């Protein structure tokens, strides 16, 4: 009886091990419970350099949330339409970045699609297809622009930095084909006023972001008026402003990715648009069932912007202004920029 019992026990153990191996293999080869498609900035379009941050967001989602994310650079609207194919290997969420990719995504999405969709850093005044079924997220760039303005207002007219002069004047240059230009300008202007009681801002607007000649003319005019710091909204014209800054020995503040290496002495800092954090926030919200459809605004609370390091300018940014900037960041979400 003991021998028979031992054989039964051994047989039971073998069966248990075989079942464990079977289920482990099945789980290992099964489709992930949630799949995300991430549509980056189109090649050659504004924001293309931010794809590196988007890919970092992809890796962070995969590492921290354990979710499969496929990153793609669209070549046509048809490529995006394939993302909305339902089925066992289909996606649960499609996230797009920027104006061009997001418009293509919204036009490609079928009206009856049940796949969740989120367009990040997206803002257009007119209605768009599937607007009521997708999350359309505008970055609250006026918050970050306000911090940049506060910094510029503080430095301009002081002797803390060798490239500032005694006149408390700064400038803003933006392009009218950017739907966010009004937010950049309003935030920056308000920040300058808060950072300096005597500070003033000259605002210049280009017809398009590729109006290089006019951008150079505006930058040179600003310098003639005594401006020592120019804040630029994103656009190809930034290169012309940097050249003027190098020639006239003034400072510039840019938006997008950190470009200090291109002109270390003249790029004071950059308002970074943190697409990596936005991607993580969008996927996290979708997983929790909190990704709401419709137009919405994300700001510092969602971590969609931050200031780049001051690099070689750091010795001229006194402890006092750094503490002030931190205090301003704590309250910027509650500021009314209208």
Image (cartoon, grey):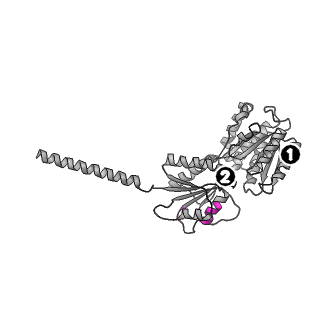
Q: Which mark identifies residue 205?
A: none
- Estimate how packed mark 1 is, as few (under 14), some (14 to 19) or many (20 or more) residues with alpha carbons within 10 Å: some
Earlier sequence position, callout 2 versus callout 1: 2
User: Label 2: few (<14), some or many (≥20) within 10 Å?
Assistant: some
Can residue 213 be seen by looking at this rendering? Answer: yes
Q: Which residue is mark 1?
A: 220
Q: Is residue 122 above or below residue 221?
A: below
Name the spot of residue 163 as percent of width and height, x first: 81, 35
Q: Judging from the image, what secondary structure is the residue with disc 1 in?
A: helix
* Relative horizontal placement of residue 25, taking residue 187 as reference (left or right): left
Position of 90 relative to 51 (above/below)? below
On whether residue 105 falls in the magenta region, the answer is: yes
Please provide the residue range marked out in magenta.
102-115
Q: Residue at horizontal 64%, vertical 59%?
A: 101
Camera-nearest residue between 281 and 262: 262
**Picture layout, residue 83 above or below residue 278:** below
Query: Which residue sits furthest left?
Result: 1
Residue at the image point whose x is 61% and y is 54% from the top = 40
| Secondary structure found at label 2 | helix
Residue 10 inside the magenta-drawn segment = no
Circles 2 and 1, Cβ within 8 Å, touching? The answer is no
User: Considering depth in this image, is 143 or 224 the residue closer to the camera?
Assistant: 224
Residue drawn at (58%, 62%), measured in percent from left and top? 79
Residue bearing mark 2? 48
- Residue appearing at x 13%, y 45% in the figure: 3
Image coordinates of residue 245 in percent, x first then y, are 81, 41
Residue 324 coordinates in the image, percent (x, y): 71, 36
């Amino acid at each position: 009886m003991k021998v028979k019992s031992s054989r039964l026990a051994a047989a039971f153990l073998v069966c248990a091990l075989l079942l464990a191996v079977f289920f482990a293999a099945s789980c290992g080869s099964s489709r992930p419970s949630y799949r995300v498609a991430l549509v980056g900035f189109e090649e050659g379009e504004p924001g293309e350099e931010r794809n590196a941050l988007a890919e970092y967001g992809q890796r962070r989602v995969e590492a921290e949330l354990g979710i499969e994310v496929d990153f793609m650079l669209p070549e046509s609207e048809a490529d995006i339409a394939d993302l909305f194919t339902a089925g066992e290997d289909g996606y649960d969420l499609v996230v797009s970045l920027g104006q061009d990719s997001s418009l293509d995504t919204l036009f490609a999405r079928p009206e009856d699609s049940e796949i969740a969709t989120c367009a990040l850093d997206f803002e257009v005044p007119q209605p768009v297809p599937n607007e009521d079924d997708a999350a359309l997220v505008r970055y609250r760039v006026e918050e970050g622009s306000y911090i940049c303005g506060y910094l510029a207002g503080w430095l301009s007219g002081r002797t803390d930095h060798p490239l500032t002069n005694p006149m408390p004047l700064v400038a803003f240059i933006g392009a009218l084909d950017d739907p966010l230009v009004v937010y950049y300008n309003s935030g920056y202007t308000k920040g300058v006023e808060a950072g300096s009681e005597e500070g003033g801002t000259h605002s210049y607007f280009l017809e398009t972001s590729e109006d290089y000649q006019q951008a150079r003319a505006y930058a040179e005019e600003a310098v003639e008026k005594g401006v020592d710091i120019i804040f630029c909204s994103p656009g190809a014209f930034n290169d012309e402003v940097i050249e003027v800054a190098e020639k006239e020995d003034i400072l510039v503040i840019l938006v997008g990715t950190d470009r200090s290496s291109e002109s270390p002495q003249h790029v004071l800092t950059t308002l970074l648009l943190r697409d990596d954090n936005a991607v993580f926030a969008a996927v996290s919200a979708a997983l929790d069932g909190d990704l709401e459809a419709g137009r919405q605004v994300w700001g510092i609370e969602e971590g969609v912007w931050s200031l780049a390091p001051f690099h070689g300018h750091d010795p001229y940014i006194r402890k006092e202004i750094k503490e002030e900037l931190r205090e301003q960041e704590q309250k910027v979400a509650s500021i009314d920029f209208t």
